[in-house]
Every structure is written in structure tokens, then in C-alpha cells.
Image (spheres, helix red, strand yellow):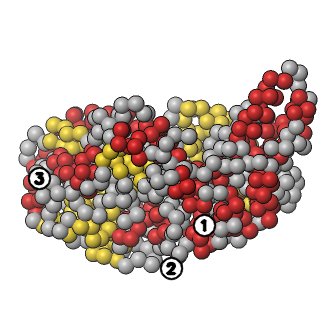
Amino acid sequence: MDSGSAPQRIADLRTQVARHDELYHRRAKPEIADVDYDRLKRELADLETQFPAAALAAGADSPTARVGDDRAEGFQTYRHRQAMQSLDNTYSEAELREFHARLVRLLGREDLAYVVEPKIDGLAVSLTYEQGRLVRAVTRGNGVEGDDVTANARTIHSLPAELKKSKTAPAPDIVEIRGEVYLTLAEFRRINQGREEAGLELYANPRNLAAGTLKLLDTREVASRRLEIVLYGIGACEPAGAAGDTQSGYPARLHGWGLPILEKSWTARGIDEAWAAVQELDRRRDAFAYATDGAVVKLDSFALQREAGRTSKAPRWAMAYKFAAERAETKLRAITIQVGRTGVLTPVAELEPVVLSGTTVSRATLHNQDEIARKDIRVGDTVSLEKAGEVIPAVIAVNLERRTPECVPYVFPTSCPACGTPVVRQEGEVALRCPNYECPVQVRRRVRHFASKACVDIDGLGEAMVDALVEKGWVKSAADIYRLRRENLLSLGKDVEKSTDNLLAAIEGSKRAELWRFIHGLGIPHVGAASAKDLAVRFRGLEALASARLEDFLGEKKASLIEGIGGTIAQAIVTHFNQPRNRTLVEELLALGVAPKPPAGAAAGGASLLGKTFVLTGALPTLTREEATARIEAAGGKVSGSVSKKTSYVLAGTEAGSKLDKAQALGVPILDEAAFLQLLPPAG
Ligand code: IVH
């Protein structure tokens, strides 16, 4: 680059970076991978340093000098007492060592102690506690002021409304506590599956979904997705001394106040130890509850942090080392179409097998038609793959240098590849659908789902068996399973007498499966196992659920009447049963003798756990965790992972951890196994 072409390149890069900032921070819909974004930003920063005159000519305002802005429509903004900065980052060990060398020069000493923390891939928030009470939760915004998301943050179960009284470190009068809101992988998958079935656009990774969720204007909807939070720092604090004097003192302090903290952090003397900690983190981070995209190396001493100071954008005393998601290039052999249970057509990339992060990948989802067009993906292209959110392989981009004239744009089918019905695109959806309810692939998938382990769990009715029965035309719906005839099954092969009898017995036995299994098995969009359990407790029967109206789910001002069931799920249920065929299926099932077992609750006698929430901690003398959970759920209760004021009981065994402390602090009743068993309805 020479000084002649620098101004143009700087201007181009500024436009590009500003656009990606907007997509990432404000809309939670990035179009490029983090590494590529960081590369653009780095190139811009380097050019601005190298050609200061050109940078100035392009204007004073550059995205390299500010933090990305997440403020969105519909929220009140709030000014942070202490600004929330960003972090400088690097992908290179040498640059991390250079960060240390800079601090050595700046501070005039070699013996620098660091803390190494996981860098959580979530959404930054600042919580203000006044006199120990949570008064506000605000996003980072532009660093100076952010969006007030207090109502949404209050739906996070693990977030205490009041700080615990800690003897060693009393809660400050006013304190800003900083951390990240995130979603677990399991929750990410649950929500995306619901969206896929409903034909809605999928979230690319847990971070985007967490960010999108915290910025929903409908708090009921937020409550139906289970956000989590982890806290690692302190902003403004009065009196100042209450924050302590080292970074390494934070976890104990925050934990003492009852806040969820990082799973692990390291203290390191010097940069060699810090680098070793970064590598250890990389080996262990898969086991963390949240996605991490790097390590943050911070000077331990607050006195030294103050001395090192900050730039307009980031502290000089900290550096993020990012783990580049592994990438691989391979050839896109073909695009095939998968027809889902609800008729959604999903394009799938059929790839020349390639190893990515230790697994061989030969297929990857391309999400939908728009996504293929936006990335201009053509059959025959060489594409680069990455594990999105380090989870599902995704096609990131096309390597245009390797595109040949034979690579032709993909034409999305206009009719269903399975049944030939013309596809439709419904308003508000990104997906194309096959509208034919009798489409054989949809029928197979619906019946497979109903019979699967996650639903009614009919032993012997696996995918291959379902496919055979559908193929023969004997099964067209879940109800037909209960109409199967022995002589038909016997005709499927030689020596099948025994397996036929076993299957018929399993089918007969399944008629009394738990109610939530049937509800899940009906395949209502957005209704997964967890929602099905919530619905079973409230409705106690399939008929009651099928005839429920929107008012039965949502009360005045649309407040959710059933825990865990927000507006989207409620609407999906009502829409589902507005279709006569879906109501007919329920009627047929019941007429065929299906008698789902409602959760033991009020009807089972005085000892019901209906509406009670339990948290399990430690090892119980006789019950396993799974057994205890099953007993609680069977009695109408729920099990949650974290203690809050809403927890009814903590069931504690030996070696109970922080959950027990928290229960004591909040005054939540604590049960041992014997006391717990007394609460349960008598067996049988
Ligand atoms: S410290 C003044 N520590 O990464 C520096 N940030 O890319 C404050 N982040 O805005 C940040 N994990 O949202 C810090 N252990 C950690 C972090 C962390 C994730 C986020 C944070 C920050 C962003 C910068």
C-alpha cells in the first residue's frame, strides 16, 4: 500500500467495519466470522497508524476508536457510572508476549502478575446493585450508555435480586457488576429446533441468540428462553475499597455476594505462566457451560492497572487472546434438500469429506434459500467450513479464486423433492415448505418422532421399522400405530413372530406413557420436552390442551399464566389445534385407548409437588440424580439448575457445594433424602 491508495482503502475499510459492527452488535446477525472481522479491523488500524494524514483526511471518526454500539429501538438508555470499555485482541502468541513487554516498559518492572480468565462469548452487561438490591441491568451500548434491560435480566434464574450478606466482604452501597449473559448449548439447540420446525430463520450461534433474546421487547418471551449469566468484574463501586485490590480477589468476592462466577481462572507470575494458562484453558473450555472464544489476560494488581491506564477504547492492562475457530476448505459436491417433519425444505451441502476440529465432516446445513444466495454458494465451489459457535459445521464462505465456469448457481426446487407438490413460502418465514401434509417424508418423520425415545418411546419402533410401515401404507399417522394388526406385521418377514409380539406389547404398553411424552410426540412447533412437561402439569390431559384458547395461556396484559410458556409457544399450540386434522388425531388416539398418565399432582393426594421447584446438590445416600429428578417430576414438581428466591426446596446430599450456601443465604428450605421422600406421594 502506498500513500496514494491508502485514503481510499481506509475509507472502504471504515465503511465495511462499521457495517459489520452494526450487524454484530445491534442486530445480532453477523455476516462474517469473527476472525474475518478482526482481520478487517486490524488492517484498518494498521493503515491508520502507518498513514496518519490519510486517516485524518478520511474523517476523524473511525470504528477503530470506539466500541461497537449495541443500543436498539425500544429501550430506555442509561449512562454507566464507569464506562464499559472493549478489549484489544490478538490471535498470536508473539503479540501477547509483546503486550507483556509493553507493560514491563511502561511500569518499569519485570515481575508482573496476571490473571487469565476465559473470554465468554456472550453479551456484556452491567448490573447495578444499590444497598444490596438489583436496581438495573444495562447493556454495554456504546460504552458510555447502554440499553436498560432490567426486566429481561430479572428473568435469569441464577441472578439474585439481592446480594448475599458476606462477612468477609460486605456489599458496597452502590456497585456496578460486569459480566456476560449467555445461553447454554442445550438451550440454543432447543430454541433453534423450534424455530426450524416453525420455518423461521435460525440463529447462527448461542451468542447471537443470547444477544437477540436479551433485546426482545417482550419479557414473557425472554422468560421462555433460559438465559444465564456469569460475572467477572466490577465497575464503579462506593466505597471504592469494597472492590478489593486485586483482580484475583474478584471471584471469591462476587461468589460471597451470591453471584454466578467464572468456572475457572488462573493466576500467573509472568507471561510464560500466563501463556501456559491460556493453553490449559483451550484444553478445558469444551467442558464449560458457556461458549468461550478466547482468554483474557489481565494485570492482577489494581494499583498497576491504574498506572498502566487505558486508551479511548480499551485498557492497557488487559489483552484478549482469541482462539481461532478451526477452518477447512473442501469441495461442495452437491446440494440436496431435506424435508422436515413440518414440511420445511432445508438445503444441505454434500461435501468432499474433510477433517475439522477432529471430526470428519461430509455434510453441513445451508439453512435456507436466502443464505445460499447471500453467500453466492454454487455447486462445484471450494468452500471454507467452520464449526459455528464451535458446534455445528457451517459453510462460511466461497473461495472465489477456485471457482470454475462449471460452478453454476443453485436453483432452489419449486416443488417438493419427495412428493412433487409445489412449495410455498409463508409470510414472515424464510423457509420454503412442502404444504402436503401427506407427503411421505413428512409422514415418516412425524411418526418416527412420535415413537422415538424422546417422545412416547415405543421399543422396537425405530426409524427403519417406521419407514417400512409407512411404505406399506399401514401407518399414515401416529394413531395408525395403535391400529396395527398382528397378521400385517407377521407378513414383514420370516421368523418375526417373537419380535412382532414384543412390538405389539410395547405399543400396547405405550398407551399409558406419561402425558408430556404424548404432548411432545404431537410435534407442535416450538414445543420440546421441557415445554411439554410444563403443559402436562397445567392441562393434565390431551383434550384439555387441544381445546385450550389463548386466554388459557396468557392473562391480562398478556402475562404468561404457565411457567415456561411464552407467547410464541402459546400461539403455536393454538394454531396447531385450529387445524381440524390435529384435533382429529387427538380424538383418534383417545378413542384407540390411549390413556396418558398425567403428572402425579393435586389429584394424587395431599403430598403433591405441583408448582414446587427443586434444586439438587451433592450425592444422595440411595437415589441417583436421575431417580430423584424422575420422582420430583412424577409428583408434578420441577428441577432447576440454580438456586433463586423462587426455589421451593434444595435437596442436598454429601459434598453439597455453593448451591447449599446460596439456599441458606436466601432462606430456601433444605431437605435431606429422608425428608424429601416424605414429601412424595405414596408409591403406586
Ligand atoms: S474484561 C475493560 N473479562 O469481551 C475490560 N471481558 O471483546 C472489560 N468478555 O466487552 C472486559 N469475557 O464483554 C473481560 N473474562 C472477561 C470477559 C470479557 C468476555 C467480553 C466483554 C468485553 C469483550 C471485549
Badge 3 or badge 2: first in the primary sequence: 3
Numbered tag placed on residue 167 in the rendering: 3
In terms of secondary structure, where does tag 1 sit?
helix
Question: Which of the two residues, 614 or 391, is positioned nearer the viewer here?
Answer: 614
Disc 3 from disc 1: Cα separation? 46 Å
Q: Is residue 343 visible?
A: no
**Which residue type does callout 1 highlight?**
Ala
Q: Which residue is mark 2?
A: 557
* Residue 570: numbered disc: 1
Q: Is residue 6 left or right of residue 243?
A: right
Quick one: label 2 or label 1, which is nearer the N terminus? 2
**Judging from the image, what secondary structure is the residue with disc 2 in?**
helix
Q: Are marks 2 and 1 in contact (CB under 8 Å)?
A: no
Confirm whether residue 509 shows in the render. yes
| Residue for point 37% across, 65% down | 153
Looking at the rendered image, the quarter that the C terminus falls into is: top right
Q: Is residue 248 above or below residue 204?
A: above
Q: From mark 3 to mark 2, how far is it between C-alphas?
A: 42 Å
Q: Nearer the viewer, residue 345 or 435?
A: 435
